[in-house]
């Protein structure tokens, strides 16, 4: 399947993609979900301004982003975030309210339409030229449904999720497992992701080239270097020589 490609300074046979903020616009999705959650749960959330709800959600999300939960603890992980959300809003965080928030979130988040601009086209073009896969720090119940909502679930030769594998980016072991599943040598497997800390650092530690999709001009916070940095996902096609023009 792979034809190989010579890009400046690196030869590529395969590509592994991050999902959140790379193919899926997580921030936009969460804004859309919060609006729908207020409509679904008027007693719990109807009195809150959208700004206050957004602030509380961001706080709850940040407070739990580094928690390491495994498949058996999924519900506990979501309920912890829901509890912090209610506490941030000054609402009683009893089990019933916490559960209602978690249920609404799970129902809405995976099916909200929020692709990154150009994601479908980029994946399609890359898939015509290379072995491609997904490598994501994510919970399987939501992430597979998100890929289906994006229309991309069947586009990849492998989908590797941290909570199924047992290690999270930036641990190089999950990058090496992605290369193994894709059957591409790490040095010839490009990782495409938006996070310096997880993606650039992790790919470098695994000996992989990395395309840093840095749309929000995050600063470099370590010694690892991306092979290429882009601010539009479609620029990946230009670099790979796959753009139409
Ligand atoms: Mg990401």
Image: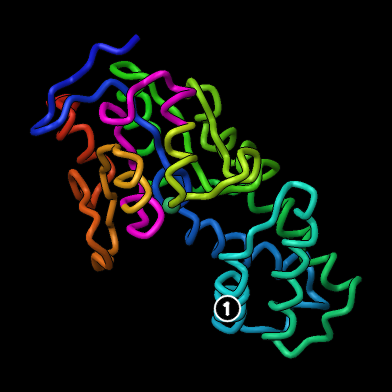
Q: Residue furthest bottom?
A: 90
In the rendered image, which quarter is residue 58 located in? bottom right
Measuring from the top left, give residue 26's x and y in whole percent: 50, 56
The response on whether ligand 1 sits within 8 Å of label 1 is no
The residue located at (78%, 66%) in the rendering is 79
Q: Nearer the viewer, residue 37 or 215?
A: 215
Rendered view: 44 above or below 181: below
Report if residue 148 lies within the magenta region.
Answer: no
Mark 1 neighbour class, 10 Å CA radius: few under 14, some 14 to 19, many 20 or more = some
Q: How many marks?
A: 1
Rendered view: 177 above or below 201: above
Measuring from the top left, give residue 31's x and y in whole percent: 54, 65
Q: Is residue 155 visible?
A: no
**Side of 240 relative to 215 (left or right):** left
Q: Residue furthest left?
A: 8
Q: Where does the N terminus fall, quadrant-wise? A: top left
Rendered view: 7 above or below 118: above
* Highlighted range, magenta: 178-200
Q: Where does the C terminus fall, quadrant-wise? A: top left
Q: Nearer the viewer, residue 107 or 74?
A: 74
């Amino acid at each position: 399947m792979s034809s190989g490609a010579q890009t400046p300074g690196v030869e590529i046979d395969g590509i592994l993609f991050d999902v959140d903020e790379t193919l899926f616009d997580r921030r936009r999705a969460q804004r859309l979900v919060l609006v729908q959650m207020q409509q679904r749960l008027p007693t719990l959330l109807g009195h809150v301004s959208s700004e206050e709800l957004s602030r509380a959600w961001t706080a709850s999300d940040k407070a739990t982003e580094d928690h390491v939960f495994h498949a058996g603890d999924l519900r506990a992980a979501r309920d912890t975030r829901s509890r912090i959300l209610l506490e941030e809003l000054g609402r009683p965080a009893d089990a019933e309210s916490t559960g209602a928030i978690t249920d609404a979130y799970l129902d809405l988040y995976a099916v909200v339409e929020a692709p990154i601009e150009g994601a479908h086209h980029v994946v399609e073009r890359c898939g015509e030229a290379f072995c491609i896969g997904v490598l994501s720090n994510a919970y399987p119940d939501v992430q597979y449904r998100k890929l289906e909502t994006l229309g991309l679930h069947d586009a990849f030769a492998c989908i590797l999720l941290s909570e199924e594998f047992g290690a999270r980016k930036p641990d190089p072991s999950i990058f090496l497992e992605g290369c193994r599943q894709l059957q591409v040598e790490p040095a010839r497997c490009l990782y495409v992701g938006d996070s310096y800390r997880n993606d650039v650092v992790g790919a470098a530690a695994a000996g992989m080239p990395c395309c840093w999709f840095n749309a929000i001009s995050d600063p470099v916070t370590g010694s690892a270097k991306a092979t290429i940095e882009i601010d539009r996902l479609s620029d990946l096609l230009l670099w790979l020589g796959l753009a139409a023009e």
